[in-house]
């Protein structure tokens, strides 16, 4: 067996913890250290824990750094800094700003002879991969992306800002009727309302007016007004018991036509009991690919579109052809 | 717009016709000629039709040749010959002999500075791609492949050899109960019988003993004995009306566990009204990738595991990042 791939984790929230767990499932990898801006003593990792400020000391000692910070403030700042010192993988997911982030990461990595894979995970990531694959194979077609059933952080935050709400969680749910129409080969024009359903579980403040809360939620512009939204009032106990997990999932599906209007449907679907653990597992597989690209002498920013799938596997090309082709 | 990619088709059966139709859906491609071992005058293509023996004259005039022959006898012979003269794409699907075919194609292509992508389509092809992807992301898991609902040529041939059978078609059908167990995160051990159901539509010879036919089919070793098989007797008219199409499909699904036994499920599914037209569409998208690899100066045999998904798309990397990431 070759030497293990030396991995570092930057940031130790849900994603960082998931990456540690995923590395443990991959015998060709070793977690060198976790880097944090918090007090290292407060981090419950089994690995060595170091201060973020000490990252520079690890130059040359880590093959790939997995950036587990958020896209709003962490990655735009840390990404280009770290891409200048290490090969990196991240899950930058602010779709609209990806070209800008790519340009900065490409500049930093290329100048310093590093490889930086940006925006992986499942969306962006595996879903993006399937959108490109499906469109290339069925050019005459329509692609649809559905998210859920899963917790939307932004919508849960919005719900919690409604007066009288003590705790709140919002699930985004694909409209199964719409999905089934596409699965049958139809290429429907779907309104926002027809694509997803929103479901809220609310623990009200004692004495709060539940009807007023419901009304405030379902009419909230942008977040809920364009959707069919169900609001359920539950106890604090039920909230803790039933809504503490982070399930998610989704579907990318394309209905297309070949030849003389022949219907062809391709679908990619995931059902996750833990969204962060799955995203972490994707990051770790792509870290292996980044390690290989760097070994080949490639440099610059990359996305999932640029990486041969074989590079994600610990198996040799010969074994892949023999066992899985 | 760049110059069009000049494509040639070798063999004009269902697959070759599908490739012609798929090229027509891709404005960045042009079909230069169809090559056949039959009388060119007998071929109903809209393109120029040439004799197989004249292929050599097209050296340097075709960017990628799509080989549409069968895996049993055509490709083992034609593949290495043509890989020495052209960049090629094929759908070689004799799983057990892929390593041997790969070696021959690699030798022929590499020696002559060409690129040959072998064994694409949907299985081998897109299904293989997803088997590798899923296994790399969820190393602690089990992958299952289901085929159908679709016609199995081998099983239909077996049915037609039964005495008293005039016409016969056999459909392979995934066992939905098994699929649903995996979708729920279970990782069941499945017997052959639990994976697929077989369904036969038979037009009996006049006066044939239907019960004897049924018994001969369901007890046939290897082909049917290990399965639950339904046999339906129909009229010649029904056979023509209801069973002339070539639908197919299938599922690659992996149930895995991350962290502390967290269930994660990933699934890739296709539902095809025409199996050959879909396979053709995959071949054509991969022809674009081969064209690009050749432009980059790559040589030798490749498989779907070696090709970045972005290479399949006519869009630029910038547009892909902006629109589909």
Image (spheres, coloured by chain):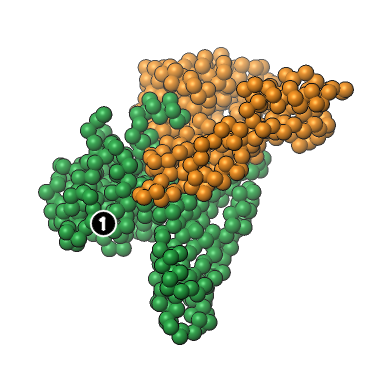
Chain colours: A green, B orange
For disc 1, the chain is A
Q: In this rendering, does residue A178 appear at all?
A: yes
Name the outermost residue toward the right.
B207
Please state which of residues B81 and A280 is positioned toward the viewer in this rendering.
A280
User: In terms of image quadrants, where is residue B40?
Assistant: top right
Q: Residues within 10 Å of mark 1 (few under 14, many from 20)?
A: many
Where residue A31 sits in the image (x, y, percent)? 23, 45
Q: Foreground: A137 or B214?
A: B214
Under tag 1, what secondary structure? Answer: loop
Relative depth, front residue between B255 and A64: B255
The residue drawn where x is 74% and y is 31% is: B231
Q: Is residue B29 visible?
A: no
Which residue bears the numbered disc 1?
A12
Position of the N terminus of chain A, as image quadrant, is: top left
Please state the horizontal and vertical placement of residue A227, each as a whole percent of the image. Answer: 54, 69
Residue B173 location (% of width, % of height): 64, 37
Q: Is residue B303 above or below residue A252?
A: above
Count the marks. Answer: 1
Q: Toward the viewer: B28 or B182?
A: B182
Q: In the figure, is residue B83 to the left or right of B13?
A: left
For image coordinates 13% across by 50% down, the residue present is A56
Q: Which x, y percent locates residue B207?
A: 88, 22
Task: Give the residue displayed 72% in from the left and 19% down from the top.
Answer: B161
Left or right of residue B189, residue A50 in this image: left
In the image, what residue occupies the spot 53% across and 19% down? Answer: B75
> Quadrant of the rendered structure where residue A12 is?
bottom left
Give the vertical position of A273 relative to B303 (above or below). Answer: below
């Amino acid at each position: 067996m070759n030497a293990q791939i030396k991995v570092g984790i930057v940031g130790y929230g849900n994603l960082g913890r998931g990456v540690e767990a995923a590395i443990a499932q991959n015998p060709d990898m070793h977690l060198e250290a976790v880097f944090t801006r918090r007090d290292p003593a407060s981090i419950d990792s089994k690995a060595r824990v170091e201060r973020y400020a000490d990252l520079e000391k690890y130059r040359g000692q880590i093959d790939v750094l997995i950036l587990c910070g958020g896209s709003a403030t962490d990655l735009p700042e840390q990404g280009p800094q770290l891409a200048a010192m290490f090969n990196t993988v991240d899950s930058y997911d602010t779709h609209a700003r990806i070209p800008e982030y790519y340009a900065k990461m490409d500049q930093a990595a290329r100048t310093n002879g590093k490889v930086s894979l940006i925006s992986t995970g499942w969306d962006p990531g595996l879903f993006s991969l399937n959108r490109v694959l499906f469109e290339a194979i069925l050019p005459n077609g329509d692609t649809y992306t559905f998210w859920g059933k899963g917790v939307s952080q932004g919508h849960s935050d919005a719900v919690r800002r409604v007066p009288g709400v003590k705790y709140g969680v919002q699930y985004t749910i694909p409209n199964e009727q719409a999905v089934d129409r596409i699965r049958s080969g139809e290429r429907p024009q779907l309104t926002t309302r027809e694509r997803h359903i929103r479901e809220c579980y609310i623990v009200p403040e004692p004495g709060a007016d539940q009807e007023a809360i419901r009304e405030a939620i379902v009419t909230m512009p942008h977040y809920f007004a364009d959707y069919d939204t169900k609001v359920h009032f539950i106890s604090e106990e039920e909230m803790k018991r039933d809504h503490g997990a982070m399930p998610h999932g989704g579907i990318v599906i394309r209905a297309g036509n070949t030849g003389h209007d022949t219907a062809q449907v391709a679908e990619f679907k995931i059902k996750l009991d833990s969204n962060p653990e799955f995203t972490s597992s994707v990051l770790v597989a792509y870290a292996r690919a980044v390690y290989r690209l760097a070994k080949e002498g490639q440099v610059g920013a990359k996305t999932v579109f640029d990486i041969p799938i074989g590079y994600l596997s610990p198996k040799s090309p010969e074994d892949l052809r023999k066992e899985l082709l």
